[in-house]
Image (cartoon, rainbow, N blue to C red):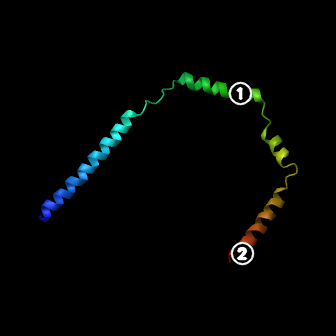
Amino acid sequence: MSPAVETAAWVAGIWLAIAVTAAIVWARYRRQPPLPQRTPADVYRDAADCRARREAEQVADDLDNCQAIWPDPPSWRTAEAQHRHDTAKQQREEG
């Protein structure tokens, strides 16, 4: 086989593979059910339902939750000193 014919065969094979792949992808795409169409009224209704549920639950604010989890938080100076200590320790272990 001449190089020109061999090259043409490779190109034709590549184009055939692309066509087969495109046909398979197109067939799968056509079988999928259509996406649900939401109207602005649906969105507003869902937002109002969520807002009403949140107000009905009367969730405690973040500060109450924080104090329940950590009743006596350290000051920022303590936290900063702890961070410096941990960083120095990590650098000593690495280096």
Q: How many marks?
A: 2
Furthest-bottom residue in this view = 95
Judge by depth and name the residue closer to the eye, 62 or 46: 46
The residue shown at (16%, 57%) is 8
State the separation of the CA atoms marked 1 and 2.
51 Å
The residue shown at (11%, 64%) is 2
Q: Position of residue 28 (x, y in %)?
A: 37, 38
Q: Position of residue 17 (x, y in %)?
A: 27, 50
Numbered circle sitting on residue 88: none
Q: Quadrant of the C terminus?
A: bottom right
The residue shown at (73%, 76%) is 92
Q: Amino acid at mark 1?
A: Arg
**Taking 82 as reference, is 24 above or below it?**
above
Judge by depth and name the residue closer to the eye, 63 or 46: 46
**SS state under label 2:** helix
Mark 1 and mark 2 lie on one chain; the one further toward the N terminus is 1
Q: Amino acid at mark 2?
A: Glu
**Image-quadrant location for residue 66:** top right
Answer whether labels 1 and 2 touch (C-beta < 8 Å): no
| Residue, disc 1 | 53
| Residue, disc 2 | 93
**Image-quadrant location for residue 41:** top right
